[in-house]
Amino acid sequence: MSKKSPKNIIEDRKKEGIELALKNTSAMTKTTLLECVELLHCALPEINFDDINTSTKFLGHNLKFPFLIDSMTGGTPAAQKINTRLAQAAEEFGIGMGVGSQRAGLLSNKLAESFKVVRKNAPNAFIFSNIGGAQLSQGLDYQSIKKLLQMIDADALAIHLNPLQELVQPEGESNYLSVLSRIDELSSDLDVPIIVKEVGSGISPSVAKKLSATKIGAINVAGMGGTSWAGIEQIRAKKFNNKQKSNLGLLFWDWGIPTAATIFLTRNSVKTPIIASGGLRNGLDLAKTITLGADVGGFARPMLTPASKSYNSLKDFINQLILELKSTMFLVGAKNIDDLKSIEYITTEPLTSWISKVRK
Ligand SMILES: Cc1cc2nc3c(=O)[nH]c(=O)nc-3n(C[C@H](O)[C@H](O)[C@H](O)COP(=O)(O)O)c2cc1C
């Protein structure tokens, strides 16, 4: 049997990642804890629903709504179709969009096309590139980083921190040496802002502080409770008969800081703009994350599911999301996003402990 090239290995992994995420590989026994946030009802909103203003500015870009399509895909023919639809929606709705890790795009011109379709279909939207912290640790050079930004004429670069995924992934690269210093260096050298993101295990206060000491533009906390990458890699490890990694994936399936907690803790530690993601599933979830301290929300799997069916399914989902967000704003008396950031809310257990009892 012939040995697969790095390009084919990445292509296969991307394909499996999409297929498994579509099967709903979410946290198993734990949640985002967004259900422990209760926004106080306002019986006297004194707002005309139709006048509610959902627009916001993020990293210098005007967004019509305070959410993004989070970094997901590219690198396979199926991904090209999905990225085309996601980009069309980003352009039509005036929201932002991230592509998935562009490592595949650096290896082959054909695979680069699955990323390039994004800028072609979203000439004006806020679009961001993506690469892994592990690749920075391995010495991915400045020229390659410029190349991946140029591939989609990117407005920002997302660098993902995924130590858990790398550990469980059968072919994972669990070397995280010097990642912070590379982020620091790039945050001074690049002419677009950097977004540092997790992929589903959250950002702790100490990591947030280290990141905010660099010149990065934003942190995407990507907390626990949504898509589980330990889960996706566990299923792949099992398929490859890698028992150790499969057991590891089961043990750490729900590892991480719940999304509601990581937003609150990060906002209370640093002033850096925050993207909230990890298990946001509707407009009420989104509104809660903004009240907890996020500037915008990010949706990955909930966008992937309709985008893999048709453009109309994706539009239906986004329209529903907007209706739910505006309805929440109406019910709490928030006429714009600044109001939503400062409304009254309570937290219940176990979130209250998460946000008040972090010890060292
Ligand atoms: C199919 C799929 C592929 C993803 N690929 C990437 C990636 O390449 N780079 C990255 O930073 N995050 C990636 N993510 C993580 C998301 O950006 C997000 O942080 C995480 O899935 C949590 O959001 P969710 O619960 O809404 O899915 C991916 C998520 C999904 C569902």
Image (cartoon, helix red, strand yellow):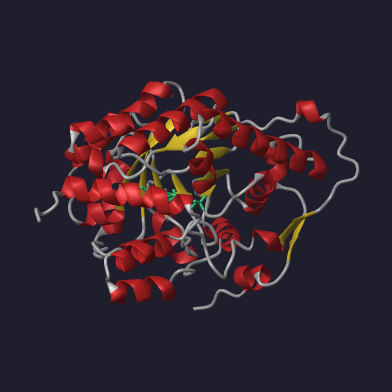
How many marks on residues? 0
From this viewpoint, which residue is outermost toward the right?
44
- Find residue 166 and report its image quarter: bottom left
| Depth check, front residue: 154 or 98 | 98
- Residue at 80 percent across and 38 percent down: it is 330
Q: Is 203 situated left or right of 296 in this image?
A: left
- Residue at 53 percent across and 45 percent down: it is 299
Q: Is 167 situated left or right of 199 in this image?
A: left
- Residue 32 lies, in percent from the top left, at 59, 61
- Residue at 25 percent across and 44 percent down: it is 103
- Residue 137 lies, in percent from the top left, at 22, 57
- Find residue 210 and report its image quarter: bottom left
From this viewpoint, which residue is outermost toward the front?
1
From this viewpoint, which residue is outermost toward the left?
2
- Residue at 45 percent across and 65 percent down: it is 206
Relative to 334, residue 21 above or below: below
Q: Quadrant of the N terminus?
A: bottom left
- Residue 261 lies, in percent from the top left, at 59, 63
| Depth check, front residue: 22 or 115 | 22
- Residue 44 lies, in percent from the top left, at 90, 41
Judge whether residue 286 can be spotted in this image. Answer: yes
Judge whether residue 273 can be spotted in this image. Answer: no
Q: Is 57 situated left or right of 349 in this image?
A: left
Relative to 58, residue 332 above or below: below
